[in-house]
Image (cartoon, rainbow, N blue to C red):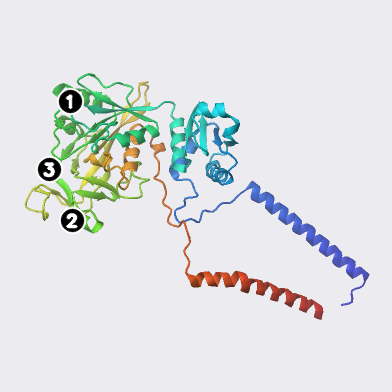
Amino acid sequence: MRLNVSVRRWLRFQHLLFLLLFSLAIGLSAWLSARYPVRVDWTTSGRNTLSEASQALLARLEGPVRVTAYVRDHVPIREGIDRLIDRYRRYKPDIVLTFVNPDLLPDQVRQLGIAGDGELSVEYAERRETLQHPSEQALTQVLQRLSRRQDRLVLFLDGHGERKPQGVANYDLGVFGRELAKIGIQTRSLDLAVESRIPDEAAGLVIASPQTPLSSDEIRVVLDYVQRGGNLLWLLEPADPSGLQALAALLGITLLPGVVVDADTPRLGIQHPAFIPIADYGPHAITMSLRSPALLPQAIALEVQPLADWQMAVLLESQSSSWTETGSLEGQIQFDPDSTERPGPLTVGVALFRSWPTESGELGDVTQQRLVIIGDGDFLSNTYLGNGANLALGLNILNWLVLDEALIISPPRAVPDPSLHLTESALALLAAFFLIILPAGLLASGWLIWFHRRRR
């Protein structure tokens, strides 16, 4: 084909039109990508995506959240904080992030108690809290506390050798009490020998393994509290000495004799047969977010036949290889079918709930009364709280009891793929591809295009 003047002009027009349309397509693509971003999390654990619990919490927050990051001119810290907050902004766009150099505002830093580089000040609903180590779990807990108009008060029964929420002994619950404070649940001990009535402002009562019997007057106060619609967490132990048989009868609970043991625990690296792993969780808001087993040391089994107005959900159940051992736990033990021992699976934790009229007393205005009974108290103790999902289970139980199941926090996600390990041959192959094969392929394709055009 001969290239005369008109053909050349037509080809130039085609080239200009192509460049114009191509530039327009690139510009529209850039505009669409900025206006409608698409993000895909390819990590194994999905750690770059907010957990369902965090998403549910953000959906409940009304109004803006203001986050102030006190960071000096340290780019990596700023980028990390910006990425974290950006994950929250995907579900709540009115989160405002501001970076402040703490050296420029020393008075404000002292007033807020900012001590280190990278700390956050989070403000919501005219309440403010400082976060020292930003992470999804920590930031969600801060938002959870700020979303509560006031902290919830949970009372721990005291005066009978119970586990103390501020105690430091191995069997106490001091660590668990501090974790509760982090999510806006305040704890206080209650001695019924001093206070003859459980205060109405208490969001729940915890009976944590009494070692001596309660008096008849104290038992009457506890029964009255439950009958008035109070929420309760009851942590039981083998050969329970509390004398609360009347409470068990009121709730339709029978404590099976013996201690739950599991024949498969040695295969899991657990030396004591009475330390049972709980991997079978019932379908419930308390257990929905749990991903790892809980460890219950020396638990008892429960048999529950709730009364007509109560509903029941099984939370924790032992393995089929377990049974209730009524004999000595020393030496070789085995199930005796001719005794009172019961084979597994066995129920060791239940939730009871029923509809209850609210304080307003208006027709149709009801809430829920909630009770949780666990056949073990050691799993929340200072010694065993860090095992498996014990802490997450305890926090979820208390959140559910105080009617904040929407705030149940998922445990932090594991990071199974933090680094990429390649063999020497794989590294050599990658180097050869990017340094030799790919450049050579581009050079060869360019030469072929040039050669083909020269022949035309």
Which residue is the site of mark 1?
A: 219
| Vertical order, 429 against 189 (above or below) | below
Give the residue at x 75% y 59%. 22
Q: Nearer the viewer, mark 2 or mark 1?
A: 2
Which residue is the site of mark 3?
A: 257
Instruction: State the CA–CA distance, disc 2 to disc 1.
Output: 37 Å
Q: Give the secondary structure at mark 3.
A: loop
Where is residue 172 shown, x and y percent of the image?
Answer: 25, 35
Which residue is the site of mark 2?
A: 263
Where is residue 49 shown, x and y percent of the image?
Answer: 49, 48
Give the residue at x 87% y 66%. 10
220 horizontally vs 422: left or right: left
- Total numbered badges shown on the rendered structure: 3
Closer to us: 130 or 28: 130
Q: Amino acid at mark 1?
A: Ile
Where is residue 248 shown, x and y percent of the image?
Answer: 18, 33
| Vertical order, 353 against 8 (above or below) | above
User: Residue 255, labelled with which disc?
Assistant: none
Give the residue at x 83% y 64%. 14
Instruction: State whether residue 125 appears in this view.
Output: no
Quadrant that contains the C terminus: bottom right
Q: Give the secondary structure at mark 1.
A: helix
How busy is the neighbourhood of tag 2: few (under 14 within 10 Å), some, or many (20 plus)?
some
Where is residue 222 shown, x and y percent of the image?
Answer: 21, 26
Instruction: State the CA–CA distance, disc 1 to disc 3.
Output: 22 Å
Disc with the residue nearer the chain's start (1 vs 3): 1
Instruction: State the CA–CA distance, disc 2 to disc 3.
Output: 18 Å
Q: Give the secondary structure at mark 2.
A: loop
How busy is the neighbourhood of tag 1: few (under 14 within 10 Å), some, or many (20 plus)?
some
21 horizontally vs 38: left or right: right
Q: Residue furthest right?
A: 5
Instruction: State whether residue 369 appears in this view.
Output: yes
